[in-house]
Image: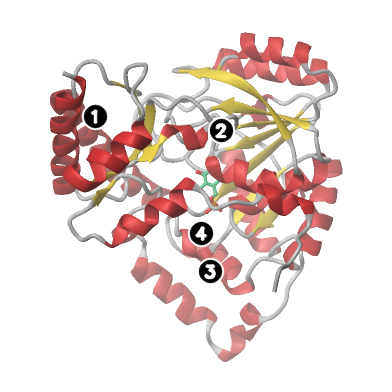
């Protein structure tokens, strides 16, 4: 049956990452393409006892409908944690989400009419481009370097695009590049947002996974006019399958986002919200996050050292101070998607994500994102060494 669809479906297409997963079945393949946390680090024993306690008759309400904004105890716990970490807020500022991904959808629904310009980093998080696409935005892109979004370039982009409403940034351990925005640039970004009347969506699910260096204040904590929506998630600090995230915003924005949340899915899963709240109340989330930092930090070190040893000098990489990824820059003219299809997958048996997919306007074929959190130490060494061997031949 030939079927016609809403116009927005023209923008809803399978992503390169989905294509890549097709190759995941080859047991010899070492994939640096994913962005998963390491499931061997999930706090299974603690979560088992949390879920056991919730699935008792006297706790049956943990399977009941609850308020759309989220379980009050969880909102309270998040506000306390974020306040303790330097971003002051109260429970009322917090909206619980079904994963951080839902925040991308809701904020875009609130701010983007078809054809509106959204400012994003170049490159940016692919999941954000996927979430924004049905709203039919156009993009204005801002350069990024090792200190995050280039705010001089942002000032130019804003001058060329009057009336822009929304800016999206991943300031901490950026996906895909791993870089972190400097404090100076964060201050400048807030100044520019105030000057131009922007709403800033600060997406920071990796913030707590810092391996070294000092935390840089959140944009939300530097916000002077209630323009920053801070978005975060339990996916990388607890477990992504719980599908829990949160946003914190000014009362005016939070209220509207709450109405959109109600329309989208009524509420996030009550059991998951209870479990996260009980975990925070009864166990030590900070100690758990510390274990993750140590484990992922060691994997980061191993990956960077192996890249430095195995790759030709003409391949650049970032030095992420946290998060899950590093970003490779190959010489001009190198096509990382072609190399993956013709050499990396069939010969080296290694996958990564070709960089083009993270650029709102495509292009930039000479980059790749590589993940270190969900690859064993042996596979990091073997996969990077194999890739390096083939890159040396290719780039000789
Ligand atoms: C930058 C960024 N934002 C948001 C998300 C969404 O994560 P979740 O929906 O699991 O919270 C991710 C997941 O990888 C991400 O990397």
Q: Specify whether tag 2 is near ligand 1 (CB below 8 Å).
A: yes
Q: In the rendering, at what x and y percent does residue 263 appear? A: 81, 63
Q: Which residue is painted at 62% across and 85% down in the image? A: 60
Q: Where's the C terminus, which quadrant?
A: top left
Q: Specify whether tag 4 is near ligand 1 (CB below 8 Å).
A: no
Q: Which residue is painted at 15% across and 24% down in the image? A: 392
Outermost residue to the front = 2
Find numbered disc 1 in the image and state the secondary structure of the residue it sits on. helix
Pointer 4 residue: 280
| Looking at the image, residue 42 lies above or below residue 192 | below
Residues under labels 4 and 3: Cα distance?
9 Å
Which circle's residue, 2 or 1, is located before the other in the chain? 2
Residue 230 makes an appearance in the image: yes
Other-residue count near label 3 (Cα within 10 Å), few / some / many at <14 / 14–19 / ≥20: many
Find numbered disc 4 in the image and state the secondary structure of the residue it sits on. helix
| Looking at the image, residue 316 lies above or below residue 374 | above
Please name which of the two marks, 2 or 4, marks the residue nearer to the observer. Answer: 2
Q: In the rendering, at what x and y percent does residue 7 appear? A: 78, 51
């Amino acid at each position: 049956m030939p079927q016609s669809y809403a116009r927005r479906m023209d923008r809803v297409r399978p992503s390169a990452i989905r294509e890549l997963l097709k190759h995941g079945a080859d047991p010899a393949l070492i994939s640096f393409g994913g962005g998963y946390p390491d499931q061997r680090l999930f706090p299974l024993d603690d979560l088992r006892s949390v879920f056991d306690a919730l699935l008792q008759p006297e706790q049956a309400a943990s399977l009941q409908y609850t308020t759309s904004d989220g379980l009050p105890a969880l909102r309270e716990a998040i506000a306390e944690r974020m306040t303790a970490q330097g971003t002051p807020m109260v429970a009322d500022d917090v909206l619980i989400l079904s994963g951080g991904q839902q925040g991308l959808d809701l904020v875009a629904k609130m701010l983007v009419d078809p054809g509106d310009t959204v400012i994003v980093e170049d490159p940016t998080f692919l999941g954000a481009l996927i979430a924004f696409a049905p709203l039919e935005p156009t993009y204005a892109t801002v350069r990024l370097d090792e200190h995050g979004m280039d705010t001089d370039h942002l000032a130019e982009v804003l001058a060329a695009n009057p009336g822009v409403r929304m800016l999206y940034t991943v300031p901490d351990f950026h996906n895909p590049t791993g870089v972190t925005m400097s404090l100076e640039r964060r201050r400048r970004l807030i100044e520019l947002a105030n000057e131009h009347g922007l709403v800033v969506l600060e997406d920071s699910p990796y913030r707590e996974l810092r391996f070294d260096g000092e935390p840089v204040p959140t944009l939300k904590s530097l916000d002077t006019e209630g323009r920053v929506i801070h978005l975060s998630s339990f996916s990388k600090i607890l477990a992504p399958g719980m599908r829990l995230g949160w946003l914190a915003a000014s009362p005016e924005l939070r209220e509207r986002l709450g109405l959109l949340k109600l329309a989208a899915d009524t509420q996030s899963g009550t059991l998951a919200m209870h479990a996260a709240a009980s975990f925070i109340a009864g166990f030590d989330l900070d100690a758990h996050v510390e274990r993750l930092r140590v484990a992922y930090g060691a994997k980061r070190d191993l990956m960077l050292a192996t890249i430095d040893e195995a790759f030709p000098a003409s391949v650049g990489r970032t030095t992420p101070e946290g998060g899950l990824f590093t970003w490779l820059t190959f010489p001009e003219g190198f096509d990382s998607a072609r190399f993956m299809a013709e050499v990396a997958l069939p010969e080296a048996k290694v996958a990564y994500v070709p960089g083009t997919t993270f650029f709102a306007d495509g292009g930039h074929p000479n980059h790749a994102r590589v993940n270190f959190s969900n690859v064993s130490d042996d596979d990091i060494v073997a996969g990077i060494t194999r890739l390096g061997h083939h890159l040396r031949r290719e780039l000789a």
